[in-house]
Amino acid sequence: MGSAGGSAGRRAIFKPVFRSIPFPAALALVAIALAACSDDKPNPNDATPSPGPPVQITAADFSFSPKALAGAVGVPFEVTLKNAGTVQHTFTIDEFLVDVQPNPGVEVTFTVTPSEPGEFNFYCKFHVDRGMIGAINVARD
Ligand SMILES: [Cu+2]
């Protein structure tokens, strides 16, 4: 459904912007972009949010925010989870052996390393039935 049109559209937008930048500045931008990527593997896919940066998640009574995360196989990312609710919540991802349970008002930081690609749920073990569920999309890396 229009994937060819989509990439042509992106090129049409990109080209004039790039042309208006003086050549040395353009090189500097490329250098910055390369430096921003992880040292070992540049990310060729701009459409995927780059994994690695810390993620802030709030657990409330009874929801997570945000409800969607992105990661890549084998790339650890740091999660800071704040329990902003009045009861205990968990942040659980069965597939990646993640199961943390901060008390109300407490913030915990931990690392998640996706071990396989696909879409997986994170949820609160106590309140999944009340809508405390979200998804992490893990790209093959
Ligand atoms: Cu909960």
Image (cartoon, rainbow, N blue to C red):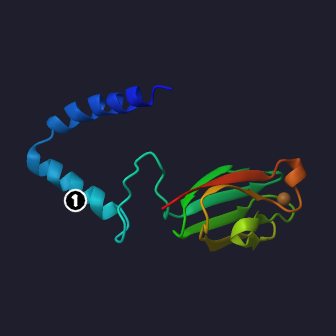
Q: Is residue 26 left or right of residue 115?
A: left
Is residue 66 visible to us here?
A: no
Q: Is residue 81 left or right of residue 72?
A: right
Q: Is residue 139 left or right of residue 126?
A: left
Residue at image point 27% right, 28% down: 12
Is residue 123 visible to us here?
A: yes
Determine whether the beta carbon of the residue marked 1 sits less than 8 angstroms from the nearest atom of ligand 1. no
Q: At which x and y percent is residue 20?
A: 15, 35
Q: At which x and y percent is residue 62?
A: 83, 51
The amino acid type of the residue labelled 1 equals Ala
Q: Nearer the viewer, residue 28 or 102?
A: 28
Q: To which quarter of the image does residue 127 belong?
A: bottom right
Q: Nearer the viewer, residue 135 or 139?
A: 139
Q: Single out the residue that lies furthest toward the left.
A: 23
Residue at image point 76% right, 66% down: 94
Residue at image point 55% right, 59% down: 71
Q: Secondary structure at mark 1?
A: helix
Q: For mark 1, what is the residue?
A: 31
